[in-house]
Amino acid sequence: MGLITYLTTIRFEAGAARDIGSDLTTLKIDRPLVVTDAGIVAAGLVDRLASGAPALKSAPVFSDVPTNPTEEAALAALEIYREQGCGGVVAIGGGSPIDLAKAVALLATHDGPLEAYAAILGGISKIGPAVAPAIAVPTTAGTGSEVGRAALITLRDGRKLGFISPHLIPKLAVCDPELTYGLPPGLTAATGMDALTHCIETFLSPRDNPPAEAIALDGLARAGKSLEKAVANGSNVEARQEMMMAALEGGLTFQKGLGAVHSLSHALGGLKELKLHHGTLNAVLLPAVLRFNEPVAGEKYAALRRVMGLSPEQDLASFIEDLNQRLGLPKSLREMGVPKDVFPAMAKAAMADHSTATNPRPATEDDFAALLTAAY
């Protein structure tokens, strides 16, 4: 598929990861820190990439990335980065390793504390261009973090905050669909719904950005046609490629902003006593938010239906509920183990989230509580 330059540089094709050695040379990263998780290491993907890249063979590896990346993990990885004299990071995995790598790249060149750079605390302007260079190698087709300008990190006090800057976008995204062939059906479904939700929410955002909206609709069309195929047959090469492109396109549209689905999933993802998968949360929350937003976005809902091959009178929220069921995803927050007593705190946290400003319909704290109840 060749070279794409849009916000950053992307190499997208089967086998693209085999050339990561030359990518490191191009970016002048002679000693990277590899940021990944234990599952990626166990699957042999780190060794697979290192086989053709001498700089990776001797690189230190931080593999203690939690399901929802934390400030503690970022500081632990930063310590290794500094001790080993690293000059950049290579993130291998899903959104969690990529987001954590962004935090490390930020802290490696900017004085702490991390909280000072949070978007909702006025930190966007404090992030300068000196962020350490990063290469992102996604192994799932969902988050789009490989081309996103944000990192979601849970601070020590439990707040899950967004760190946003164009300087946090990895210098290179290496998108190799071959790396997703071994992804199990459940994770394929959850990450795929993450990509689909990104495309829907960014398209519905009220910000004016027609090119990004066109990209979002293209990503949605690809996900709509290919997600169930990828879940049913993980070796379906075309479906895997289409889903990786859908995830990439969802990430390319983040500049439009997300919405209430992400306001809530960010809040819920910060619950330390639960390990809630971000994509699964998005899938469960999406129908309720679609019903909430429809009164103010009728024309855009018509476009969503057309792209997804639905009839003009078909209910989009019900379609997503049926899709979740076909994919084997949970039907509700209750099924995910979320207790109702956290709803007030989650509604309050959602109000403070950076995604709330770009939801098409203004939401109050009471609205967020009602959405949580509807998804319960």
Image (cartoon, helix red, strand yellow):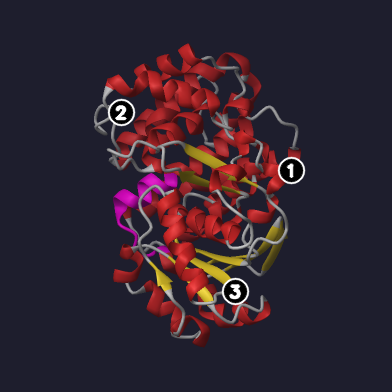
Residue on which the image places disc 2: 333
| Cα distance between the residues tagged 3 and 2 | 42 Å
Q: Kindly identify the residue that appears in the image at 59 percent across and 74 percent down.
A: 87
Marked residue nearer the N-terminal end (3 or 1): 3
Q: Amino acid at mark 3?
A: Gly
Q: Which mark lies nearer to you, 3 or 1?
A: 3
| Image quadrant in which the C terminus is located | top left
Q: Say above or below: 177 vs 314.
A: below
Q: Position of residue 34 (x, y in %)?
A: 47, 70
Q: Which label is found at residue 87?
A: 3
Magenta: main secondary structure equals helix
| Cα distance between the residues tagged 2 and 1 | 34 Å
Secondary element at tag 2: loop
Q: Kindly identify the residue that appears in the image at 41 percent across and 56 percent down.
A: 73
| Image quadrant in which the N terminus is located | bottom right
Left or right: 72 with respect to 357? left
Q: Residue 51 is drawn in which quadrant?
A: bottom left
Marked residue nearer the N-terminal end (2 or 1): 1
Left or right: 207 with respect to 374? right
Q: Nearer the viewer, residue 152 or 72?
A: 72
Q: Amino acid at mark 1?
A: Pro
Q: Nearer the viewer, residue 342 or 329?
A: 342
Marked residue nearer the N-terminal end (3 or 2): 3
Total labels drawn: 3
> Was residue 185 drawn as part of the magenta stretch in this picture?
yes
Residue on which the image places disc 1: 211
Secondary element at tag 1: helix
